Amino acid sequence: MTEEDVKYYTAADDSEQLEQLRAGLMPFQLVKYFSFSSLGVILLFTLFLSWAISNNAKNVMLDQSEAYSLLLAENLNQRIIRDFVLPTVVNYGNIALSNPDQFQRLDKIVRNATRSMKMEDVTIYDSTINIISYSTVEEKVGKKNLGGLEYEKALQGEANSQIHSRGTVLNLLPGTLDVRYDLKTFIPFRLFQEGSDSNGQIMGVIEITQNLSHEYKAILRLQRKIILVSSLVMGILFLVLLVIVSRANKIMGKRVRERLALEQKLYDVEKLAHLGTMVATVSHEIKSPLGIIRSTAEILVKRVKKLAPGNENLAEIIVAETTRLNNIVVEFLDFARPQKVNLQAVDINQSVKQVLQFVKTDLATKGIELISELHPGIGKITIDPEQVYRALLNIIVNGIQAMPDGGRLIVQTSIVRKDGSIVISITDTGVGMSEETAAKVFKPFFTDKHKGTGLGLAITKNIIDQHHGSIAVVSREGKGTTFTITLP
């Protein structure tokens, strides 16, 4: 529900209509809620999917790298046995890496074997004590107790690996620590015997360290791309959905308001129909006795003049009041049972002149200046002259009553160039009306005068509606009022 809807109905101070509006929008609110909820779930699922894909890629990389390390270690093991251990035992009788010649020979063999391979370093542990006998990193040689659980497993003949990593997707941002990812593989250093199917004696443990930082960075970049693309797509979808929901919310609100207005209008029409039926019935029942009273009063006036001259005014009062009541009854009947339109080709300027001629005396009596501006090229239009005459008369009489101290009455006719419609404008410089009053003047039984039924302008609007025209009013308090009639 938009703020516009709330403000509209709050200003109208109609809590029932506000509740109806909310009830009308409730299904759409549920759709909107589920749409945004689904979008959030999709975003979370996408982020989870990106993590799963990158994690799977990392596991594949580890499996391949570990297999590669094991293969490399096995190959290195055989080369050390073949090119170093056997010749050294033959030449020196035993292996002592503390001998510089033996150490340099082993170092040369290891470096030649790993030169074209992605090795960070190679370390060989002794089998009897946890000490580093050889390493491509000189600082490690002679260090004790650096081999942990992995070293122990390798001594038992079980090759295994250990990961040392540092960094996440956030470490790809500038100014953060560099990403580091090392895979350490431990395999038993065995003494292979030619032609033997046995695994051979374990002489120590070979540790091979691979630097997989480059591959790990590639996986993190992939993860970052998936997250960014997913977030971008979800952001675009969210904005599109937000625009659609906002527009749909306005459309739904507008339709609900139109439906409520239509229901109110139908209710008013039904109420007026019942009221019209009641008014027509009552007026019809009153009209006949009223006519009898008037006729009797007229006879009574004549007889009083003969029998008691000077008292006939009492009977004349009865005649005048019954005449006024009869006019009110006729007005009720005209509103309750509108007459059928008898269309004729009529010069509208001539109809306007007839109305002005009728009120000419009243205008002069009240000191009202008449300004008539009738367009000469209008010609004839198809209308019911009697009903249009009555509609114009009702408006002009209202204008005259609004100028008790005199003023100006301006009557104009013109042609709308676009569709050829005829416009009749009636303006007075009277007391005017407030916006609230102007909005109610065409409602039945509404009046701000001490006298009258409040049906004059309602009947006028019915007449214009029957001619498929329109009538509008613009008024300012203390400035005057303008009625504008448009006839096709």
Image (cartoon, grey):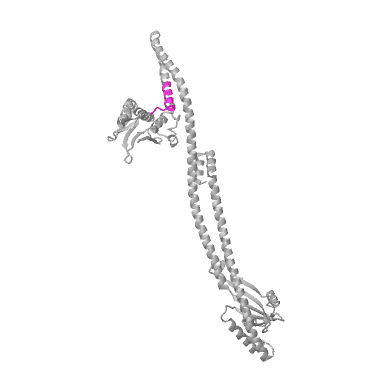
Q: Is residue 132 magenta?
A: no
Residue at 64% across / 85% down in the picture? 82
Q: Left or right of 270: which side holds 213?
A: right
Q: Left or right of 386: which side holds 61?
A: right
The percent coordinates of residue 331 (x first, y second) are 42, 25
Q: Main secondary structure of the magenta part?
A: helix
The percent coordinates of residue 160 (x first, y second) are 66, 74
Residue at 47% across / 23% down in the picture? 281
Q: Quadrant of residue 168?
A: bottom right
For the record, the magenta segment spans 325-340
Report if residue 143 is visible in the image: no
Q: Give the residue at the far left of this rendering.
A: 376
Q: Left or right of 478: which side holds 188?
A: right
Q: Quadrant of residue 88?
A: bottom right
Vertical relation: 460 (above or below) 154: above
Q: Give the residue at the far right of this rendering.
A: 128
Residue at 56% across / 66% down in the picture? 169
The percent coordinates of residue 40 (x first, y second) are 56, 56
The percent coordinates of residue 352 (x first, y second) are 32, 30
Q: Quadrant of residue 435?
A: top left
Q: Give the residue at the far top of this rendering.
A: 307
Vertical relation: 278 (above or below) 47: above
| Viewer-side residue, 76 vs 274 | 76
Q: How many marks?
A: 0
Q: Left or right of 239: which side holds 307?
A: left
Q: Quadrant of the C terminus?
A: top left
Report if residue 234 is visible in the image: yes
